[in-house]
Amino acid sequence: MSTMQLYTHPHSRGVTVSWMLEECQADYQAIPLQFRTDMKQAEYLKLNPAGKVPTLVHDGVIITETAAIVAYLADLYAGKQLAPAVATVQRGEYYKWLFIICNQFEPALTDQKYQTEVTDEMRFSLGYPALDVLIKQVTEHLSQNRYLLGEQFSAADLLLVALLAWGAVYDKIFQLDDTLQAYLDRAIARPAYLRTQQLNDGYLQQLNDSANTQAD
Ligand SMILES: N[C@@H](CCC(=O)N[C@@H](CS)C(=O)NCC(=O)O)C(=O)O
């Protein structure tokens, strides 16, 4: 398999992809980019027209969107068992959680972060409930299951944990109860997560060093 390139920033959703690449023990090269400058250059906009990270390039094919990249890697490294086999009922449940996380949890989190006013009429057609409804749903599920799919940690957990960490730990938009805290702790104790933290500290240093060199 050829080396993949990950365009990322250590304070971004790119960390979620880093974590997945580490889970898969993938062969990849990380290319840290500065916000506002590198990400808005014409060359990079050809890869990701939104001017955002992460972007993964594999065999010349460009894959954007954190969840798409994570789901792609789960299938590519099927031996790591981070996604159930295709055409099984477990795969259906896995898709359910992936789409709840992307289509419901993330927009609801963003609404709460930015205090977006959502009227009942808007809610009717918005396609996702308020954040507290989703937190209740995952809390109830995880109070009876070690992970979203039962005993086995999956790519869906990795995406949910990233959002829980963002919302509860970094932005403090909501609090984790004992169930969610224990779930988060289990996930971030994984060796791949710990390696990801170290790697991203290194990317931050690399970006700071290059910014300082340019300022000299
Ligand atoms: N939907 C995209 C969102 C990517 C995104 O918003 N990335 C942020 C960092 S977490 C970014 O690059 N922001 C910089 C900018 O927009 O200039 C995904 O899931 O990958």
Image: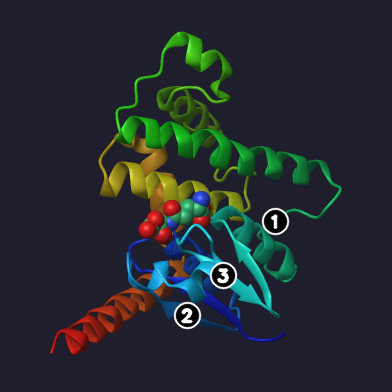
Which amino acid is tagged 1? Ala
Residue beneath disc 3: 46
- Depth check, mark 1 against mark 2: the one in front is 2
Find numbered disc 2 in the image and state the secondary structure of the residue it sits on.
strand
Q: Which of 183 and 18 is in front in this view?
A: 18
Q: Distance between the residues labelled 3 and 2?
A: 18 Å
Secondary element type, mark 3: helix
Q: Position of residue 145 (x, y in %)?
A: 57, 39
Specify few, some or many for label 2: CA neighbours under 10 Å numbering under 14, 14-19, or 20 or more: some
Question: How packed is label 1: few (under 14 Cα within 10 Å), some, or many (20 or more)?
Answer: many
Spot occupied by residue 151 in the image (x, y as percentages of width and height): 62, 49
Residue at the (33%, 70%) spot, across then down: 37
Q: In this view, does 141 lie above or below 81?
A: above
Rendered-image quarter of ligand 1: bottom left
Kindly indicate the quadrant of the structure image that contains residue 48: bottom right
Q: Mark 1 points at which residue?
A: 83
Q: How far apart in space, not on screen, are marks 1 and 3 (Cα)?
A: 30 Å
Residue farthest toward the front in the current orientation of the protein: 42
